[in-house]
Image (cartoon, helix red, strand yellow):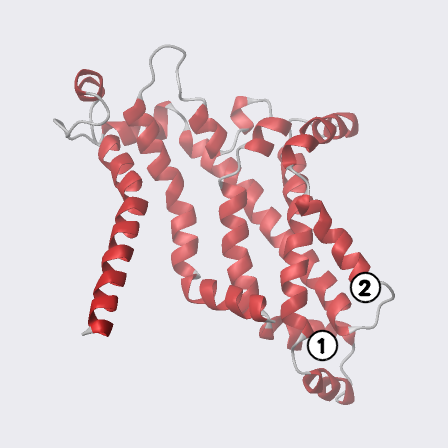
């Protein structure tokens, strides 16, 4: 009876927490199907008195969200590939070979993630401007790669460090060099961690706002998150169109998470344990 009571209480508590977590998302979805007159007359918190798909058409065409989504993908995909590629290479060298001061190097790489990004806004913006890459997607890609590299290397290092050394020794006896071992042995074994980090990094970079408005100025180069911010008017905001744009912007990250969900928890759990 006591165990049943505890189980029932646990499920009840988790149900309440889950509802509180998903309620704002459902609220945004409901608003996205309401007309502007309905929202203006009854308020955002009222029950819907209308249903329309025109908000999604306005967000897609009038707000030019298609171009913003393309910009986000042009930044996110290269940044994720470069970050994980460089991080896996660095983690491989630090974890599998006796490099002098390797722990110090790893800590120095990780220390960059401990700095609040707000104190680096002006230096990064000034540096990008001096190099001539201000207001380009290349600058935004470089910023995301630079800031994510330390964390990704730290996670992958912990994963690769505890892989059995016998596997690497067997590959060496078979005549495989460091590059062959890395590509054919280590990377396949690291796939769960790479999938989990890939899903996380895709979400972080795709939803970024801070660095986008720091190094990008032109409206036609803005990723989707700052583009949604630009939909807010000075006096009147079409909250139903903003909500529709938010739902559209969430589709790519949701698709990535659903694709890699079986690796998401397992990969991070293994990396944390190791």
Dot 2, how many residues are within 10 Å of its Cα: few (below 14), some (14-19), or many (20+)? some
Between 5 and 40, the one lying in front of the other is: 5
In the picture provided, is 130 more to the left or to the right than 232?
right
Between 272 and 168, the one lying in front of the other is: 272
Rendered position, 24 above or below 256: above
Q: Residue at x 47, y 68 (%)?
A: 266
The residue at which mark 1 appears reads as 181
Residue 102 got which mark? 2
Q: In terms of secondary structure, where does tag 1 sit?
A: helix
- Residue 104: x, y in percent? 81, 58
Q: In terms of secondary structure, where does tag 2 sit?
A: helix
Rendered position, 226 above or below 156: above
Rendered position, 1 above or below 137: below
- Residue 30: x, y in percent? 22, 35
Looking at the rendering, in which quadrant would you find the N terminus?
Answer: bottom left
Looking at the rendering, in which quadrant would you find the C terminus?
Answer: bottom right
Residue 216 in which image quadrant: top right
How much space separates mark 1 and mark 2, taking CA atoms?
20 Å
Between 274 and 216, the one lying in front of the other is: 274
Dot 1, how many residues are within 10 Å of its Cα: few (below 14), some (14-19), or many (20+)? some
Regarding residue 73, the answer to whether it shows in the image is no
Q: Residue at x 70, y 87 (%)?
A: 166
């Amino acid at each position: 009876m006591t165990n049943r009571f505890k189980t029932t209480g646990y499920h009840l508590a988790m149900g309440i927490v889950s509802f509180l977590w998903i309620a704002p998302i459902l609220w945004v979805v409901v608003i996205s199907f309401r007309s502007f007159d309905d929202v203006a007359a009854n308020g955002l918190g009222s029950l819907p008195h209308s249903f329309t798909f025109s908000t999604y058409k306005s967000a897609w065409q009038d707000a030019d969200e298609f171009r913003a989504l393309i910009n986000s993908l042009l930044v996110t995909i290269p940044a994720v590939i470069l970050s994980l590629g460089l991080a896996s290479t660095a983690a491989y060298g630090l974890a599998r070979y006796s490099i002098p001061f390797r722990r110090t190097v790893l800590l120095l790489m990780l220390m960059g993630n401990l700095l609040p990004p707000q104190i680096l806004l002006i230096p990064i913006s000034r540096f990008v401007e001096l190099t001539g890459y201000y207001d380009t997607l290349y600058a935004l890609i470089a910023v995301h790669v630079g800031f994510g590299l330390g964390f990704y290397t730290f996670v992958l290092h912990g994963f690769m460090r505890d892989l059995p050394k016998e596997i690497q020794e067997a590959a060496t006896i078979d005549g495989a060099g460091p590059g062959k071992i890395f590509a054919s042995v280590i990377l396949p074994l690291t796939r769960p961690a790479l999938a989990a980090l890939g899903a996380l990094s895709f979400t972080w970079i795709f939803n970024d706002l801070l660095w986008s408005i720091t190094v990008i100025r032109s409206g036609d180069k803005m990723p989707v998150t700052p583009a949604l911010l630009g939909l807010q008017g000075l006096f009147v905001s079409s909250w139903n169109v903003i909500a529709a744009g938010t739902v559209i912007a969430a589709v790519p990250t949701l698709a990535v998470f659903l694709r890699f969900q079986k690796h998401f928890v397992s990969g991070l759990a293994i990396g944390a344990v190791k």
